[in-house]
Image: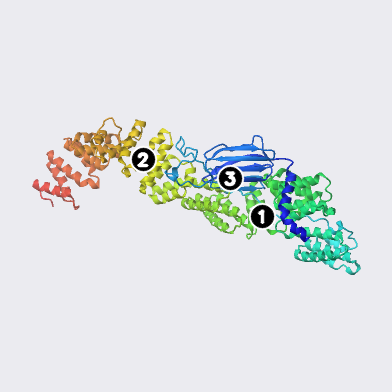
Amino acid sequence: MNVIKAMMLPLLALLLLARTGSVLAAEAVLLQEMVKQDDANLSRFVLRFDRMPGFRVETSGQKIDIILEEASLAANAPLPPSDERLVRILAGQTSDTLVLSLLLRRPPYFVNPVRDRLENRLTIDVHWRDDQSRSRPAIARALPGHVAISGDGSLSARSLESGYRGRWSDFFTEYERPLQLPAQLRYSWPPFPCLQYFRDVEPLLSGEVLDQAQQRNWSQALEACDRIDRQRLAPMQQIGLELIRVELLLRADRHRQAADLLQQLRLQLQEETPRPADLQDCAELLELYLLAQRSETPFELLAQLDLLMENNALPDVAEQLRLLQIEAFLVAGNAELAASLAEEALQGDPGPPQGRLQQRLADAWFLQGRLEMATDLYQELGQQIDDAPFSLAGYSLGLYRQRRFDEALLALRRLLEQSSDSDLRDQARYAIALALLHRGEANSALAQLHQIFPGNEGGLLARAKIADLSVAGGDARSRAQALEDYALLEERFSDRAARAEMQFKQALVLFLLERRAEAVEQLRQFLISDRLTDLRPHALALLAELLPGLIDQYVQEERYFDALVLVEQNREILVASQRNYDFLLQLGTVFSRLQFAERALRLYQYLLDATADADRRAAIYPPLLQALAALQQHQQVIDYARRYQQEYPAGTQQDQVLLALVHALLAQGDTAAADQILHDRQRPFGVALEQLAARRAEQRGALAVARRHLDQLEAQAPQAMTAEDRFLLADLCARLGDLVRASALYRQTAKNPGLRLASLYRLGELALQQGQRQEGLRFLRQVAETEEPSAWKDLAREALRMAGFRPL
């Protein structure tokens, strides 16, 4: 035995691979589908098979080779098309190998393959390094192999989408992690006692032992065995009886005592001459069952079984060894090989283990995802699976995953009745509640959830589902309570996927409560802490939905630094979320207000260069010119303005562009060119243009020209005229002799606190000029008698003295 153990571990991998190859070589694995999913810094290639092949992944520069053993590409199997990251996929087939070469547009940061045997799926995660070397701002950089701005003015980077966009509250009722039931597979024992396969046991056992064993009262059977008179037995019969005691100890889960006794018996058998082969074989069989029940992993058991079967050892129990091997493969997660071995055994005459082999075949089909075949076979087996929680759990979950909820409820209740494991029972209750919810029986489901003991995994799941239902109800107070529950559950769950779900739901509740800043921070922490969760696409989509509104809120509140921090923290998501020009221009405002003029300039230049859409391009010129002006790059302002005039001679931004051009010309000292533009009667109207033109004309003494500009402003945009504009127009009218018009305008500006004294003084002067002495003196006294210190007050006092009046 020691020699066998010494040989066992070195040969384990070779034997298992050889066995796997012999079974699967008959038919090639089919690659049924290959899909590609993208987010900000990750591309995920998902390959789905009819069963799982052997594989390896090799990376070289911009190429990834996926080598699939004993595999072929199914007819019409879809492959991902070329895009901004993938150049193309090359497929090569040899007699026994399928090679897929992924040609990428740039080398990946690292590649991580993950195999899912349960779903027959291979996932290749290609991680990209963020490129910080570009001269354009991170928020608006081009992506490899693709134009970053589309024709309609939106970023054409990868879209971040979720099926819950616009209906996020439905997530709490619709999203469901794969339901699991923690049932452990129990290895199948042959009929009691095992010794009967090797020698006659009738002289050894009493009727009491057999009766208790038939009722599975193993402890009582052991006590009855201890009462057997050993004095009447021959030495080899006594060893045989002790082997029966070992079996009873194992069946009673007293493994340590069984191991000690078995070791003593094996040493005793080695000293016998000649050695009794039948008793040694029985001891070897019991050693296997001891190994099966004591080992946490089945690989040592599998290695020993392979050695025994390779040498045709223990031929009297060959069928039992095959069943034990199948069950060990199921425990190891190799459902494909377990199914193949079970099907092979059932093709011949399996003998007494036939029913158990069918049960294990159904278990293997369930683990492979062949749910309909598995549930049909479970139904044929009927009550046989009632004493097997693992099979009952598989039957229940198979029905549930096929959405056969009425049948699933019956199967789950059978599991609840048959199982004595408290954790399994509570999770079965949780599964019953979910099935009731799917049937629309929310009240019954809620009552079922409240019956679950709160201290174990099932209790945590129940509390989470109760919180989900309270959030879906829409009450703000209930949602706030659910938020606290999710935070507590995040700490208590041991499962990574469950913790990730609780984290994301906290962010989602914050979003529904309109606590956007907290939701964004929670989502960022979630994305940093868990990069493998299937909730990541939903989190990215929610974050992409939240960010523009929150950034806009910060801009409106003039919290420009906070807005910039959000942009910098989430630049990859903003790039990938297809934001439109309005949002990008808003970012330019953020940069400008924070005096990051160079960053704003690079953003606008990038946008200008990245799209051919005329309307979208035209809208970029005004903020671009402002950014250049802030950097005092006046010649570039002139150049870009001239470029705009050539491209858009009738553009709607002409007034803004002309204003920037005029200011640039004035800054360079070219006043003649600036004034020519301002006073050109053919130029477009613009409020700021008319205001500037009027003031420059007034400064040069061109009063009529100045009045023309202000009259045009009053005619086309009266709401845009300021009190200062009206006061200047009144002065111009007075100086040009239109005293009536001037008086009317001064009366309007006198209502403005800042221009009140000046307007009253001017009204007094006009009245005196028109011979309205009393009216003029009244206006002047109002100015002179004001308590406010002002130059207009001094002028009014002087005018009154000259007129022979002394103010009070």
Q: With respect to residue 149, does 196 lie above or below?
A: below
Residue at mark 1: 427
Q: Total marks drawn?
A: 3
Amino acid type for the residue under numbered disc 1:
Gln
Q: Residue furthest bottom?
A: 231
Q: With respect to residue 706, does 57 lie above or below?
A: below
Mark 1 or mark 3, whichever is nearer to me: 3
Q: Is residue 674 left or right of residue 613?
A: left
Residue at mark 3: 59
Residue at mark 2: 624
Residue 43: x and y, percent? 55, 44
State the residue at coordinates (77%, 59%). Answer: 3
Amino acid type for the residue under numbered disc 3:
Thr
Residue 138: x and y, percent? 44, 45
Badge 3: how crowded within 10 Å, few (<14), some, or many (20+)? Answer: some
SS at circle 2: helix
Q: Quadrant of the N terminus?
A: bottom right
Cα distance between the residues tagged 2 and 1:
62 Å
Residue 81: x and y, percent? 57, 36
Question: Mark 1 or mark 3, which has the lower sequence index?
Answer: 3
Badge 2: how crowded within 10 Å, few (<14), some, or many (20+)? Answer: many
Q: Nearer the viewer, residue 767 or 799?
A: 799
Question: Mark 2 or mark 1, which has the lower sequence index?
Answer: 1
State the residue at coordinates (74%, 51%). Answer: 15
Cα distance between the residues tagged 1 and 3:
43 Å
